[in-house]
Amino acid sequence: MKLFHSYVPTIDGNLVVWATTYKEKLGLLGSDLGLSPAEVLELQQAAQAIIDGVNKTDVKKAELKEATSAKDLTKQAKLQLIRSAAVRIKTLPAYNHNMGRELGIVSPAQAVDHGSLKPSLTAASFPGYVQLSFKKRRMFGITLYGRVKGAQEWQKLDVVKSSPFIDHTPLAEAGKPETREYMAVCYDGLQEIGYPSDIVSVVHGG
């Protein structure tokens, strides 16, 4: 059985070229073929409708692509501005949690028992610094504390938003390795919350 391929292209770009050629050649050959002017016009309008339909779709696709790209850039820039402002707003003296909920800058899905929050913390020594990796339990950040083993008082190192934190604190006695202890507490942007992490220790040689 002989198979015949359609003379009408299936790819839109090729279809536009074909329809354009058909329309032009029909204007030249229509009368020679014995077609009436009305028939030629009707067929030319059909070809033009195909061309317009494909071109209109291509324009819409391009516009959609441009609009999507512009939307993504706007979201990235403006949401970063809003998030940064939200962090600052939460530190203002007049701010309270109800205000945050009304503004929509506290997560409604953050079903966390604040009373049981406890960050996890690990420590590793490297030449010149100690690296502290942590999990902040979906909070704004953690407050990090450190001390030399045997000391009674904890020293606040920093409020940290992203892991890891690099502690460049020098040795208490230059050239003498020391055992350091670290612990962390979750921080919600306003205050520490929950329980302290387990204390981790590491021998650091500077």
Image (cartoon, rainbow, N blue to C red):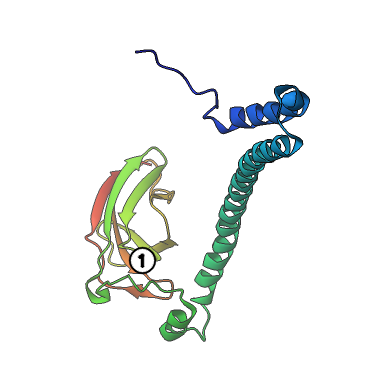
Q: Amino acid at mark 1?
A: Met
Q: Is residue 170 visible in the rendered structure shown here?
A: yes
Query: Considering the image in quadrants, where does the C terminus appear?
Result: top left
How many labels sit on residues?
1
Q: Is residue 201 left or right of residue 76?
A: left
79 vs 90, nearest the viewer: 79
Residue 104 on image: x %, y %? 46, 76
Describe residue 123's horizontal placement relative to residue 140 as left or right.
left
Report the residue at 46% width, 73% height from top.
105
Q: Residue 190 versus residue 184: which sits nearer the camera?
A: 190
The image quadrant that residue 106 belongs to is: bottom left
Helix or strand or loop: what does disc 1 sit on?
loop
Q: Position of residue 20 (x, y in %)?
A: 69, 30
Q: Position of residue 83 (x, y in %)?
A: 52, 66
Residue at the spot of label 1: 139
Residue 100 against residue 54 in the figure, above or below: below
Looking at the image, the residue that sits furthest to the top is 2
What residue is rendered at 30% in x and 62% in y? Answer: 137
> Could you tell me which quadrant the N terminus lies in?
top left
Q: Quadrant of residue 54?
A: top right
Above or below, comparing residue 49 to residue 192 in the picture: above
Say which of 183 and 90 sits in front: 90
Question: From the viewer's perspective, is 202 left or right of 33?
Answer: left
The image shows residue 9 at horizontal and vertical percentages of: 55, 27
Report the side of 188 relative to 86 (left or right). Answer: left
Q: Residues within 10 Å of mark 1 (few under 14, many from 20)?
A: some
Q: Tell me the residue at 65%/31% (across/down).
A: 19
Indicate whether 34 appears above or below 133: above
Image height check: is 66 above or below 197? above
Q: Is residue 177 visible?
A: no
